[in-house]
Amino acid sequence: MVKDVKKVKLVKGDYVAIKVVITKKTRRALRIKCAIMDISVKQAVRDLIEKWVMDVKRDVIDTKEIK
């Protein structure tokens, strides 16, 4: 399971509900990354969540079942 993804469950159809909790440590690292790379925090969070979704999709495909 992905580090900051706390809960994954199947919803009706092909949808998967993902609960994400961004810890204080992750937020701090994200702000530093944004300052270094000169990008907005909003863009960095969007990229991070997209990465998590891709990782969860890979896990779902691997396990075929989420409880």
Image (cartoon, rainbow, N blue to C red):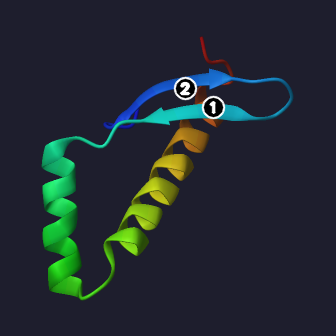
Q: Pick whichever, 21 or 48, lies toward us.
A: 21
Expressed as whole percent of the image width and height from the top left, the position of residue 50 reads 51, 58
Residue situated furthest right in the rendering: 13
- The residue at 61%/42% (across/down) is 57
Crowd rating for badge 2 (residues with CA inside 10 Å; few <14, some 14–19, many 20+): some
Crowd rating for badge 1 (residues with CA inside 10 Å; few <14, some 14–19, many 20+): few
Q: Pick whichever, 11 or 1, lies toward us.
A: 11
Find disc 1 in the rendering and name its residue.
17
* Cα distance in 3D space between marks 2 and 1: 6 Å
Q: Pick whichever, 63 or 31, lies toward us.
A: 31
| Image quadrant occupied by the N terminus | top left
Query: How many badges with numbers are in the image?
Result: 2
- The residue at 68%/24% (across/down) is 64
| Image quadrant occupied by the C terminus | top right
- Tell me if 41 is positioned left or right of 25 in this view: right
- The residue at 13%/71% (across/down) is 32
Task: Give the amino acid type for the residue marked by disc 1 in the picture.
Answer: Ala
Q: Give SS at disc 1.
A: strand
Task: Give the amino acid type for the residue marked by disc 2 in the picture.
Answer: Val
- The residue at 46%/54% (across/down) is 49
Find disc 2 in the rendering and name its residue.
8
Expressed as whole percent of the image width and height from the top left, the position of residue 54 reads 55, 51
- Tell me if 14 is positioned left or right of 27 in this view: right
Expressed as whole percent of the image width and height from the top left, the position of residue 51 reads 46, 57
- Tell me if 62 is positioned left or right of 3 in this view: right
